[in-house]
Amino acid sequence: MMNLSEYYTAGRRGLSFELFPPKTEAGLASLYESVDRLMAFGPDYFTCTYGAGGSTQGLTLDVLTEVRRRTELPVASHLTCVGATAEEIRQFLAEANRRGTNFIVALRGDPPKGETKFQAVEGGLHYANELVELIRSEPHPFGIAVAGYPEVHQEAVDAQSDLDNLKRKVDAGADIIITQLFYQNEDFYQFRDDCVKRGITIPIVPGLLPITNLKQAQRITSMCKAKLPATLVERLSENEDADWQFEIGVQHAREQMLDLLENEAAGMHLYVLNKSQAAEKMLEGCELGSPA
């Protein structure tokens, strides 16, 4: 198996898809059907999130175990500091390793619902760099991805302090950076340039979420403070028809992706929301990931 950063070496641009643990059996069946279809594009690995406060950690590992069995690809579990002591995090890492998880996406995590400020539990961790340090201190050979924010993390005082936080995560042992979703490539290019100036040299992988429904996109971007271009919102607002919004949103994402690849993006991470249709349309005819 390749080291996580090696998927993004010169002449090779990695491709990964992000899943989330569904709440129903029907949702699980749909997720695995999407995974099967996405395999046609030669992804390098799949990642899976978990619910607030670790509420679906067990199901996340169940999903990743099945995805690994079906695809024979490496898998990555999200892991946050929310609601967990350092010892509980160590226990999760041991279980993830036992079940064949290859990589960890290390995040501080958002405050639980109803709270406006992150608060570490007694015996817990306060920052993502502490989580990376803890993972590296354990005997398990996980690759580690951390998050980057082209439009600046919503809690950061300014862009410079946000970069300082990112540098601490990188120095703690991160292999790659996967960005928060964004809809204007100029934000990514500025972020990438700023990272280089700050001495951050590990691969920076753009994360894209194709819009398939305007109201849904507005809800998601409001939570992470990402900006939707006014011209794109206007275009999507011309017609509430689901097929129309799907076509316009996916076309925008594909144009983003092609421009990013033309401008030497390290690879691509797609937030697929457990559905394959938008990603399939985006990736048609593109050369990313491993040979199919």
Image: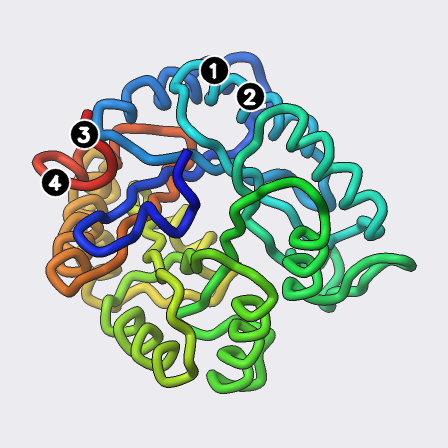
Closest to the camera, between mark 4 and mark 3, is 3
Do tag 2 and tag 1 residues touch (Cβ < 8 Å)? Answer: yes
Q: Name the amino acid, label 2.
A: Thr
Alpha carbon separation for disc pair 4 and 1: 26 Å
Q: Earlier in the sequence, mark 1 or mark 3?
A: 1
Alpha carbon separation for disc pair 2 and 4: 28 Å
Label 2: few (<14), some (14–19) or many (≥20) C-alpha neighbours in 10 Å: some
Mark 2, residue position: 65
- The numbered dot on residue 291 is 3
Q: Earlier in the sequence, mark 4 or mark 3?
A: 4
Kindly state the secondary structure of the residue where label 1 is placed: helix
Closest to the camera, between mark 4 and mark 1, is 1
Kindly state the secondary structure of the residue where label 4 is placed: loop
Alpha carbon separation for disc pair 1 and 3: 19 Å
Mark 4, residue position: 286
Residue found at the very far right of the displayed protein: 122
Label 3: few (<14), some (14–19) or many (≥20) C-alpha neighbours in 10 Å: few
Kindly state the secondary structure of the residue where label 2 is placed: helix
- The numbered dot on residue 69 is 1
In this view of the protein, which residue sits in the foreground, 34 or 248? 34
Q: Name the amino acid, label 3.
A: Pro
Q: Is residue 193 above or below residue 240?
A: below
Alpha carbon separation for disc pair 2 and 1: 6 Å
Closest to the camera, between mark 2 and mark 3, is 3
In the image, residue 271 lies at what x, y percent? 38, 43
Q: Name the amino acid, label 1.
A: Arg
Q: Earlier in the sequence, mark 4 or mark 1?
A: 1
In this view of the protein, which residue sits in the foreground, 141 or 109? 141
| Quadrant (top left/top right/bottom left/bottom right) for the C terminus | top left
In the image, residue 223 lies at what x, y percent? 53, 59
Q: Residue at x 50, y 60 (%)?
A: 147
